[in-house]
Image: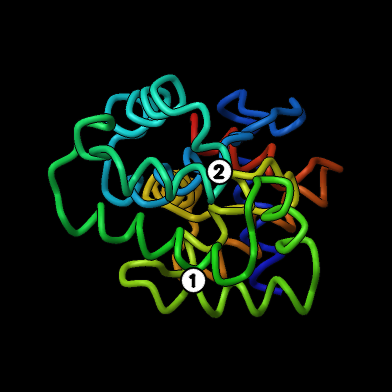
Amino acid sequence: MTTSMDAGKLLTYLDSNGISGANQVTRGWEHLGAVIVDAALQRRQRYKATVEPRVRALIEAWPDAATSSGFRARIESENLSAVIRWKSAERLHQIDEILSVFESKNINTVSDLRTWLASSPGRLELRSALRRVKHIGPKTLDYFDILVGRFDSVAIDTKIRKVAAKAGIINHAYGHLAAVVHEAAAMRGWRPGDLDAALWNA
């Protein structure tokens, strides 16, 4: 009952502010190196100013890193830090660890990753392996869905929590807000990912 009530509050807030999840959007990358770098850098960073430019720089400099094998070859022969202009060893190590998880599952392309995330047994296995990488939590796990272009997932971050607070929603637990967004989308016949995008840009 609480989820439905909060979904109603969210929709009331969106209506009063002219925000709609009806517009279908395509998000993500068809470059596996870009997916990995985006996922690793996004935590506590401004996306448009900090993350996106570095991801685009990677794609331009290393087009062959669109596969895990190509990305591994580049990382081992060149300087990723210089390409994405990132000095933090922790994030660079996280990139390597995510890549290692994908390699262990024979995930070589974004299409491969998308297939794993769409399969119930494979999805659970992959998310369990990624969860063991330091700093990967529920939000980043769900964010991988968005990064491969899935429109049925949401990733709750600080921007969405701020919208929820303005809508009068008190419970900001990750699972609760994810359920609220999914239910609000269902009430209007919207795709959850499109509503997620609208909230993120609100």
Comparing 165 with 111, the one in front is 111
Comparing 164 with 114, the one in front is 114
Q: Position of residue 100 (x, y in %)?
A: 45, 65
Q: Quadrant of residue 194?
A: top right
Around disc 2, counting alpha carbons within 10 Å, would you say few (fewer than 14), some (14 to 19), or many (20 or more)? many
- Cα distance between the residues tagged 2 and 1: 15 Å
Residue, x 80% and y 68% (percent of image)?
A: 119
Q: Position of residue 56 (x, y in %)?
A: 42, 24
Outermost top residue? 60
Classify mark 1: helix, strand or loop.
Answer: helix
Q: Quadrant of residue 172?
A: bottom left
Comparing 122 with 191, the one in front is 122
Disc 2 + disc 1, Cβ < 8 Å: no
Front label number (2 vs 1): 2
> In this rendering, is residue 144 above or below 70?
below
Closer to the N terminus: mark 2 or mark 1? 2
> In this rendering, is residue 136 above or below 32?
below
Q: Position of residue 58 (x, y in %)?
A: 39, 29
Classify mark 2: helix, strand or loop.
Answer: helix
- Looking at the image, residue 37 sits to the left or right of residue 18; the answer is left
Q: Position of residue 40 (x, y in %)?
A: 36, 52
The residue pinned by badge 2 equals: 32
- Looking at the image, residue 200 sits to the left or right of residue 9; the answer is left
Identify the disc placed on residue 130. 1
Q: Identify the amino acid type marked 2.
A: Leu
Q: Identify the amino acid type marked 1.
A: Leu
